[in-house]
Image (tube, helix red, strand yellow):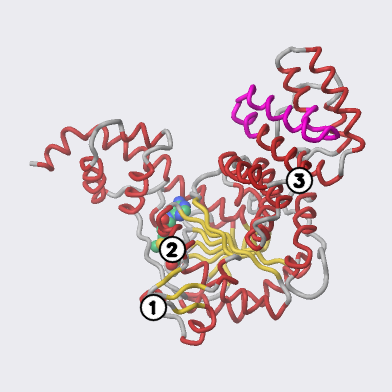
Amino acid sequence: MMGNLVANKGETRLQRLQNWVVGSLGLRVDEWQMPLLARLLDQRAQVFDDVDALEQGRACELREQIINTLTLGESYFFRHARQFELLRHKVLPELILTAAPTGTLRVLSVGCASGEEAYSLAILLEEACGSARMDWWIEAVDLCEQRLERARAARYGDWSLRSTAGTLRRQWFNRQESHYEVVPGLRERVRFSARNLGDPAIDLWREGGFDLVLCRNVLGRMEPAALERGLGHLAAALKPGGLLFLGGDEALRGRADLFAPRGEGSNVYYQRTNDAGAPAPRPQAARLTPGPSPLWLRNGRDTVFELWRQERLGQALHLADSLTMRDRSDTELMLCQTMLLLRLQRVPEAQRLGVRLLAQTTTPGIGAAAHYAKALGHELRAELQDAEQSYRQAARLDAGFALPHLRLGLLARQQRDAVTAEQELALAAELLPQEDERRLLICGHGLDLDELLAQCQTEQPVAEPA
Ligand SMILES: C[S@@+](CC[C@H](N)C(=O)[O-])C[C@H]1O[C@@H](n2cnc3c(N)ncnc32)[C@H](O)[C@@H]1O
């Protein structure tokens, strides 16, 4: 009876839901899963239209239920043990040699579920990189927020550690009454975030900065178009020559052009080819600061700015995140994080952090820049009156700060207020040559002094915030 009701009443909703799952989540819906989706819809009071809500990015609970219904989150430490052996004895030592000029190994775990794969990698990386004086980071992503929450909590039971040797358990976990907790030294090197491999707008695969990517036991649930895009994103995420590990029985399914197979038998992995259609290779950074490890602790702040100068924004943000985890009172770094988030178009996160920064800072210069960041966030959301107010507040707090005047001038020009535009741009042009080099880097949207001065010329076209 209930089944009939679902089928009749929910047919079009169900069809729309299926389309949303395929189009937006990029997940396959098999015939046998349709009744499961129907049941999910049926369980919900029809106070509002669920599919509309999903399309508008609401109905987060339903989204999670759908992901939990259509995908498995099963994982455990050192799953596919032979791959981890290969990583430990061959792949990581070789990668450390190749990555030596940058001083950093960057690894991406796609479909990390509750984090076991990422932390297993963290153990190997800490072992291999510690002795090689090499810095390392892991980005770990998944579709499912609930699994990511468990990953961030980093607490695991015996079952998750069923393939983990006792020596590793003792070294890398703190034993609690009913569970094991990953030690903080590893946790702070792994960053978890919700990302969809099929989504082209994600900065992680636009930056091409990873030496190694693991995407294991993920591809099988993706629908064909998302899968094809996803394989392209895996290639784009890797540096030329970077390595990809898939799950034991997974294959490249039609995108073999992007990678060359390495290894043998059941231990095949893949190397990104240089003409994989991914972004052009970036020039390798010179080793930034030679000397004793770890580099990021000694010269972390300088390295953030160096990465920023090279427009390696994702890496700069990652480093700034980790540094502020160690010192939460460092408001200059918080400002860097906020501005980097804005540059990467992660506006809601930038706004949340900006609010904390404004509450925390007692330094007028940082306060002024924090108001400037707030204004930029408003501008990116087309809240122009709020933006103007915050730019004015920034200019009031620091009379030598050129950039709020520049933006006020450009806003006035957009609104055809020629008098204000001329005044503000003239003031910006006067102040810009004396601006602090770091503040220009942080607040200058990737433009150098000459380019910013050029924006002050009245004939220049209106610029959008970067
Ligand atoms: C079976 S788990 C694999 C966990 C781990 N990689 C391992 O092999 O142990 C698969 C995970 O992939 C995630 N997933 C599926 N499709 C995804 C996509 N398009 N983008 C990101 N994560 C995805 C699921 O949410 C799930 O947590």
Name the element at disc 3. loop
Q: Is residue 394 above or below residue 353?
A: above
Q: What x and y, as percent, mark residue 151?
A: 46, 63
Which quadrant: the C terminus? top right
Q: What x and y, as percent, mark residue 141?
A: 51, 56
Q: Is residue 393 magenta?
A: yes
Q: In the drawing, what numbered circle is on residue 22?
A: none
Q: Is residue 217 visible?
A: no
Residue at 80% x, 55% y: name it.
306
**What are the residue bounds of the magenta stretch?**
377-406
- The kind of residue tagged 3 is Thr
Instruction: Give the residue number, with chain letter if any, for mark 3.
Output: 363
Compute the Cα span from label 3 to label 2.
Answer: 40 Å
- The kind of residue tagged 2 is Ser
In the rendered structure, the answer to whether residue 457 lies left or right of residue 354 reads: right
**Mark 1 residue's CB less than 8 Å from ligand 1:** no
Q: Specify the quarter for ligand 1.
A: bottom left
Q: Is residue 216 above or below residue 329?
A: below
Decide which of tag 3 and tag 2 comes sooner along the chain.
2
Instruction: Give the residue number, with chain letter if any, for mark 2.
Output: 114
Which quadrant: the N terminus? top left
Compute the Cα span from label 2 to label 1.
Answer: 20 Å
In the rendered structure, the answer to whether residue 255 lies left or right of residue 46 reads: right
Name the element at disc 1. loop
Residue at 73% x, 72% y: name it.
294
Q: Which quadrant of the view contains residue 434?
A: top right
Instruction: Give the residue number, with chain letter if any, for mark 1.
Output: 177
Q: Is residue 281 magenta?
A: no
**Mark 2 residue's CB less than 8 Å from ligand 1:** yes
Decide which of tag 3 and tag 1 comes sooner along the chain.
1
